Amino acid sequence: MSSTAILLLHCPDTQGIISEITRFITDNHGNIIEVDQYVDHIDNMFFMRLEWELDNFLIARDKLSDVIETLYGQRFQMTFNLYFSDEPPRMAIFVSKMSHCLYDLLARYRAGEWNVQIPCIISNHEDLRYIAEQFDIPYYVWAINKDHSNKAEVEQEELDLLRRENVSFIVLARYMQIISDELISAYPNRIINIHHSFLPAFIGAKPYHQAWERGVKIIGATSHYITADLDAGPIIEQDVVRITHRDTPESLVLKGRDLEKIVLSRAVTKHIERKILSYHNKTIIFN
């Protein structure tokens, strides 16, 4: 397949944006293969994802971002990100002791479902090293003291590794540690978490037990970007499963784990495909 460029942008809505951008692509011999746009009429904001083939495109890719900024950045008050399909994102996975999400992510990676590279798996426990070895992926462990006295040092070492490996985004596959503001700042809207609850309900620990005590009829899972506010970042994907009075907290956990795998993988897929645009703690998910 031809290499493509993917442009994600948002700006105040005004007449002529689509025609200007698409004409810019076609005038430079780009073949547009996908366009998706959305207007938030409440905030008067325009959002667009545009993908085009780079065969015969007249502007060199290393100059393209500067050209777009010069032509449209100030004119449309545009914020944008530019990606290339032949430069796959590099995904680091953080885990603790639970294996279900990790296995699912690695199975999809091994099956070739994703255009992604996984240079490392990071954990605070040794328990899942055997899985990393099965998939021939380097596994790093930094144990965090119970009093968190070494947490800042650990996260700095993790951040050094992420930078050395040129990691572009992080997936928390049931990583049972709170991420510091420093790491979040280094990867804004690029740390994907799976929360075992249909947020904003039942935040914090043991949400399935909270759901059982409340007597709800559905339980859910939520994948979202991490922010400094716990379990309150932009939501990417959610799903639910029905339960009954016959369920126990233990059966809810089992049902929930199946859901967590699916919801997390959907969110990761959208991120890898460059189909998510975050704005004001919400996400625009393009088809």
Image: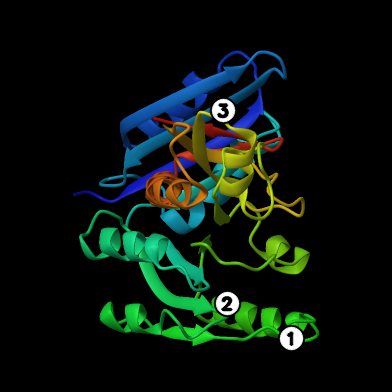
Question: Farthest residue in the front direction?
Answer: 246
The answer to whether 203 appears left or right of 81 in the picture is right
Q: Looking at numbered disc 2 in the image, what kind of residue is underneath it?
A: Arg
**Residue underneath mark 1:** 153
Q: Quadrant of residue 228?
A: bottom right
Q: In front here: 107 or 242?
A: 242
Q: Depth-wise, is mark 3 or mark 1 nearer the camera?
A: 1
Q: How many marks?
A: 3
* Residue at the (37%, 46%) spot, across then down: 262
Circle 3 residues within 10 Å: few <14, some 14–19, many ≥20: many
Q: Please, what secondary structure does the residue beneath circle 3 have?
A: strand
* Residue at the (65%, 29%) spot, across then down: 11
Q: Please, what secondary structure does the residue beneath circle 2 have?
A: helix
* Residue at the (46%, 46%) spot, across then down: 252
**Residue underneath mark 3:** 47
**Residue underneath mark 2:** 163
Circle 1 residues within 10 Å: few <14, some 14–19, many ≥20: few
Q: Looking at numbered disc 3 in the image, what kind of residue is underneath it?
A: Phe
* Residue at the (48%, 86%) spot, across then down: 126
Q: Quadrant of residue 156?
A: bottom right
Could you give the CA–CA distance between mark 3 and mark 1, rounded to whole angstroms? 39 Å
Note whether 203 is above or below 15 in the view shown. Answer: below
